[in-house]
Image: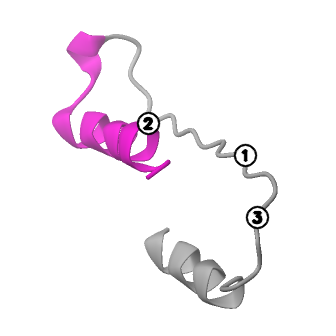
Amino acid sequence: DESTVLQAAKELKGIPIDLLINNADIYTGGDSMASTIKESMMKEFEVHAAGPL
């Protein structure tokens, strides 16, 4: 979650990062687009698209 990321940024401030691997995924269920509800779709978008930012 965002608070964990902010805490890590505080703890690592001033320390150079040589390698960063962003690997996040979430599966909210749904076998097809027809069975995927808006809330699930938005959560998946948040993790996949906005997560690496």
Establish if 6 lies above or below 49: below
Q: Amino acid at mark 2?
A: Thr
| Magenta stretch: includes residue 16 | no
| Picture coordinates of residue 9, whole percent (x, y) | 60, 79
Q: Which residue is mark 2?
A: 28
> Residue 17 — which label?
3
Q: Residue at x 70, y 85 (%)?
A: 14
Q: Is residue 29 above or below residue 21?
A: above
Q: How busy is the neighbourhood of tag 2: few (under 14 within 10 Å), some, or many (20 plus)? A: few
Membership of 44 in magenta stretch: yes
The magenta-colored residue range is 33-53
Q: Is residue 6 left or right of residue 34?
A: right
Q: Which of the two discs, 1 and 2, labels the residue nearer the N terminus?
A: 1
Q: Of callouts 2 and 3, which one flags the residue occurring earlier in the amino acid sequence?
A: 3
Label 1 residue SS:
loop
Q: Measuring from the top left, give residue 2's x and y in whole percent.
A: 45, 71
Q: Main secondary structure of the magenta part?
A: helix
Q: Any mark on residue 21, and which?
A: 1
Structural distance between the alpha carbons of marks 1 and 2 = 23 Å
Foreground residue among 52 and 44: 52
Amino acid at dot 3: Ile
Q: Are dots 1 and 3 in contact, CB under 8 Å?
A: no
Looking at the image, do the residues carrying marks 1 and 2 touch, with CB atoms under 8 Å apart?
no
Which image quarter: residue 34? top left
Residue reaching furthest to the right: 18
Secondary structure, mark 2, is loop
